[in-house]
Image (spheres, rainbow, N blue to C red):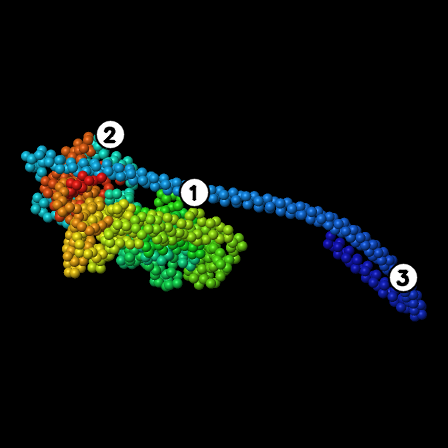
Amino acid sequence: MRFLVIFVCIIACAVAFSVVKLEENNGDVIEKRSPNQNNRRVQEQRRRQEEERRRKEDQRRRQEEQRRRQEEERRRQEERRRQEEHRRKEQEKIKQEQERRKQEQEKQKQEAERRRQEEERRHKEADKRRKEQEEKRRQQEERRRQEEERRQREHLEREQRKIENEKKWREKLREERKNERERKQQWEKEYQRLKQQNRQNQAYWNLETDHKEDNYPQEMKEKVQRGEHILPNEEDKFENEFGRYKTRTATKVIDLLTAINSGHDVENLDEGDMMKDAPNFEVENMEQTKGYCKKTENKRKSICRNQGGRGRRAVEPVYGDDEAWVRKKRDGRRDRVYLWIDRRVPYEIDSALAESQTTIITALKEIEAKTCVRFVSRSSDEKNWIKFVKKSGCWSSVGRKFWVDGYQELSLGDGCIYHGIIMHEVMHALGFYHEQSRSDRDQYVEIFWENIQPGKENNFAKETRQTSDLLGAAYDYSSIMHYGKYSFALNAQKASMLSIRNPAQELGQREKLSSTDIYQINQLYSCHVSGNGWSAWSSYGPCDLSCNKKRSRFCMDSQDRTSCPNPTSTVMLSWGIDEQMSKCSHAECNAPLNGHWGRWGDWGQCSVTCEEGVQTRSRACSDPAPKNGGKDCVGSSTQSQKCIKRSCTSGPADCFFDIDEEPLCKWTQSTSDNLDWTRKAGTTPSSSTGPSGDHTTGTGYYLFMESSSPAQNGWKARLESPVLSNVERCMKFAYHMYGHSTGTLSVRVKNLKTNQEEEVFTKSGDQLNEWKEKELDISSADQYKVIIEATRAFGFQGDIAIDDIVISNGKCGSTGAVPPKLIPTVTKVGCYRDVGYIDGKRPFPQYKNFREEINWEAYMQSLNETVFKCASHAREHKFEFFAVEYYGECWTGETAEINYGRDGEATDCFPEPHHGLGPFLVGSDYTMMVYRWEDIPENLLKGSK
């Protein structure tokens, strides 16, 4: 095949070569012709070519002409087509314009009809709104009228109930006093009966002296018998473990419960039934300080102002900072610059709080566990940090002091080292105000400004929306940042603040963070935003006078600002804060603002100058005033109350201490003493001492000497009368001396010429929880003053009070009056705790056991007999105080050796009281019911009502 291809190629090449040679030969033949022939032939050829060219040119021109004619025809046709199209479009446009005009006219007709209908509708709606507003105003007026009538009706009903309750109370009191009087008169009969019954049995009257060694456990007794010494740690173990009556026989509690459940002797509960719903208030391990009770192990259950004592209110929680030190206090600060912007709070604890470090750290860890805020020990390179210090009171500034390098103090003074108080103050440091300082608080609580202690009003100041941020949280009555009902109350029996919606609502607590507290911390510190960039924007604040509003955010990395890019403003950027300003809308700037009443003004002058009159006060609708069509304040702008002036027949030295304008009347505080007398209504701050009300009405004022700190043993309070002329006078006054550490009350007549003082009356020690009256003849050879002097004893439970001083001309009574007969009577002192041996001693030194003589089948009668027997033994040995402990142990001894208040008051003596009333005859486990022998004038017993 390959050879065949080669062969074909060779043949093709030969043929091609032959053709070329033939053409060359033909050329040579032509060239060999004659030149003329060649020229004619060339010319002919050229002519033919020229003619062919002209023919082709003519044909081309004819074709071009034809093409031009066709193009011209095409252009004419295109022009005609365009003109036709233009005419058609113009006609369509004219038709469309006509159609549009027709539609426009139709629309105008429809719009006119719509406007007419809209106008008609607006008129109808305006008429409807006007009628609705008129109806609403009428209904509001009707509601206000009905509300006013309801309030007046409720006020009248309350007053009526109050009068009825007072009548019932007085009737019950008369009945109780009658029973008490009859009971007191039984003591002498019972004593004489027992003395007659046991006149031959001298052993019956013997008392045993309590020795700690007699109660040692067997191994310690054997050690003493062997002559070995008892080591100090063994003594401590005995007092801590075996000092609580471990040698006693078992209490027959099952017998007592059986008797109660079987209904035996229930009729003997003459003063009240067994208490079914005892108050759930824990008093174990509490020690008393002035105005508070607290856990001794620093495990705070509640902070309370103890109003213990007969006739006093139950223990009432009080909360509040020492506001003399707090600047401004739970809504959060609106300005985020006050926050700890990296959500990290450095702190240090002063050495004075070293013993409290565990309690402080525990409180901080609870906040950490429920929020994103972290507390870290201060390092050397910190710019701002908190320093826990021990100064006077519990206080903190609000938020971080960003403008000052260094620490900011958070004080935890005496009485502040409790879990809830620490968290309260730390929340201030985190940037939270008090809950009752919210800008909307007037919708939820009412502040009783007239019952706020003078100088403490600023603690109830309301924050504005410009300074505080509600963080979208509802008002929280149970917030740890809320004050209690009686915080800084002038009259401790009246609230300083109550819930508007439910006056019985409890306010505040100091135990734990409420759910709203936790929510607000997490909101303020943007805990829902992770990382170290910008926090979430705050809500916009209110519109300012220029109709602008502002919001802010903070950089959560205080060290590296590059993690917070693209700030909108650089005004506060150096502090890590980004602010954004925005224009308020017209509706926001002109939003209706409802009015709210401002504070009540001072009470006006009394309508009379003596006896009883009326005074008024007013308030303005200015907090805020209604604006932009907002509603006016609801209620009256004026208020009236009864005012009491001096009696029209009062002498110059008479004083009942009830007149605010003259709180001390003409009497003055002496400058030669250590203390001042204090004017007070209601109870005194400390428990188990002082009166529960004044002597005049129970609701007025009296004077008392405060025996709590800083008062010291031997300090005096002196009250001086106006100058009196040298004539004989009768001085009548009431006094109250209650408390196991009560000091001395004396009355002196000071001769102003010789400056000599003559003591005309003195009384020392506990005189029971009741007002007593005294009459004194006073006189002097020259002008004189009467001085009432109270001297503090060894403890804080020794408040001495006076009231209702009347000084009249002439001697008291007749000159030949026979002094009344004194009746030996037993009175109750109170229920007290006994924790056992302390330093080898018990509260009473001697005892006799009547437990085996108790008949549990008729326990009330038997317990009464036990008290009679114990009283008789105390009187037989001429002892003033005695106590019944552990149902049947009779304890007594010399007054100088007795310290029944050593371990504080108790509430679980037996039988339990019912609604504050009841027998309280004997002590139960670790408690003792203390009694006292007292000689009472017969006329006072017979005159009791």
The 10 Å Cα crowd at callout 1, few under 14, some 14 to 19, many 20 or more, is some
Element on which disc 3 rests: helix
Pair 1/3: label in front: 1
Instruction: Report which residue position mark 1 lands on.
Output: 147
In the rendered image, which quarter is residue 559 located in? bottom left
**Alpha-carbon distance for marks 1 and 3?**
121 Å
Amino acid type, mark 1 = Glu
Amino acid type, mark 2 = Gly
Element on which disc 2 rests: loop
In the rendered image, which quarter is residue 74 located in? bottom right
| Residue 788 visible, this orientation | yes
Number of marks in picture: 3
Instruction: Report which residue position mark 3 lands on.
Output: 58
The 10 Å Cα crowd at callout 3, few under 14, some 14 to 19, many 20 or more, is few
Give the percent coordinates (x, y) of residue 810.
Answer: 18, 50
Give the percent coordinates (x, y) of residue 863.
Answer: 18, 35
Instruction: Report which residue position mark 2 lands on.
Output: 263
Residue at 89% from the left image edge and 61% from the top image edge: 58
Element on which disc 1 rests: helix
Q: Nearer the viewer, residue 614 or 814?
A: 814
